[in-house]
Image (tube, rainbow, N blue to C red):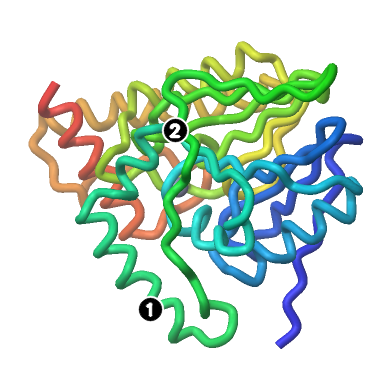
Amino acid sequence: MNISYELESITPLTVANTTGEGRGNAGGLSLRNFCVAIDSTMYVKTGELLRKNLESHFGVPVKYLVVTHYHGDHIFGFKPFKDVCILSSELTSKIMLNKETKSRYQDFIKELAKEGPIGEGIEYIVPTLLFTDKLIIQDDDLHIEIYHTGGHTAGSSFISFPHEKVVFAGDLIFENTFPYAGDPTCNPELLIKALEKMQDIKADIYIPGHGPILKGPSALNRHIKFYKDLRNIIKDAINDNLKAADVSVPDVFGEPEDERKNMTVNTWVNFYKNK
Ligand SMILES: [Zn+2]
């Protein structure tokens, strides 16, 4: 089976693959003496190609892998990065170590193995270096800033590379597709705040967790509006005692699959009911 995983040059020092071939988008950036991978795709094979292509593109070794959050389509490709430092927010690692996530993901990994070669060999690896609020990785005159914000998941984080004016947003942004905001740890208020914080950074390019890149901070407007509109719809639905299936959501990102929509609506209803 011939699997390829090409990296698109986004700026001179950043690359990404936003085709969906590895499910969650992944990419990386180069500082002066090493490069940093960001997320690892859902498969070992695409994770391997990500590392290989990063190192050949930039001509320096990968020293860190930063993971934006714990979802399988971003962490199941960790195996080829076992010898480098895998970084996440403290909450991402906490969620990964929790019994419920572990057993749910062991089942998920078994299911993927049935899909044939692409899904084989996944190991459940927990990050080893953890940060709480913000972390800076510095090399000579270049640095990146990693912010833990929560939102899409409690551990969600994004990465800013000021020199290139690029932000790696993880799943805080789904571009051109209905977002999944139904994780049990999703916090709608923190999600909106995270998008506003990213917008304040005024990057030229935002690389989402799913879908194509966004250009400029104004491209985040419709995402912020979507979540704020959804918040109003959910609050009304609570008042009217509606079932998830009867709630209609904004269609700016297209018609959602029922399952994804209902999970999101139920999570948001629970969140605002208990506020
Ligand atoms: Zn996710």
Instruction: Give percent across and percent down for residue 27.
Output: 71, 47
Q: For mark 2, give the secondary structure.
A: strand
Q: Is residue 137 above or below residue 10?
A: above
Q: What is the crowding at mark 1: few (fewer than 14 residues within 10 Å), some, or many (at least 20)?
A: few
Note whether residue 252 is visible. no
Under mark 2, the amino acid is: Ser
Task: Tell me, for residue 111, which label it has, or none.
Answer: 1
Q: Quadrant of residue 52?
A: bottom right
Q: CA distance from mark 1 to mark 2?
A: 27 Å
Q: What is the crowding at mark 2: few (fewer than 14 residues within 10 Å), some, or many (at least 20)?
A: many
Q: Are marks 1 and 2 in contact (CB under 8 Å)?
A: no
Disc 1 residue lies near ligand 1 with CB under 8 A: no
Note whether residue 123 is visible. yes
Front-lying residue, 116 or 205: 116
Q: In the image, is 83 to the left or to the right of 91?
A: right
Under mark 1, the amino acid is: Glu
Q: Which residue is mark 2?
A: 89
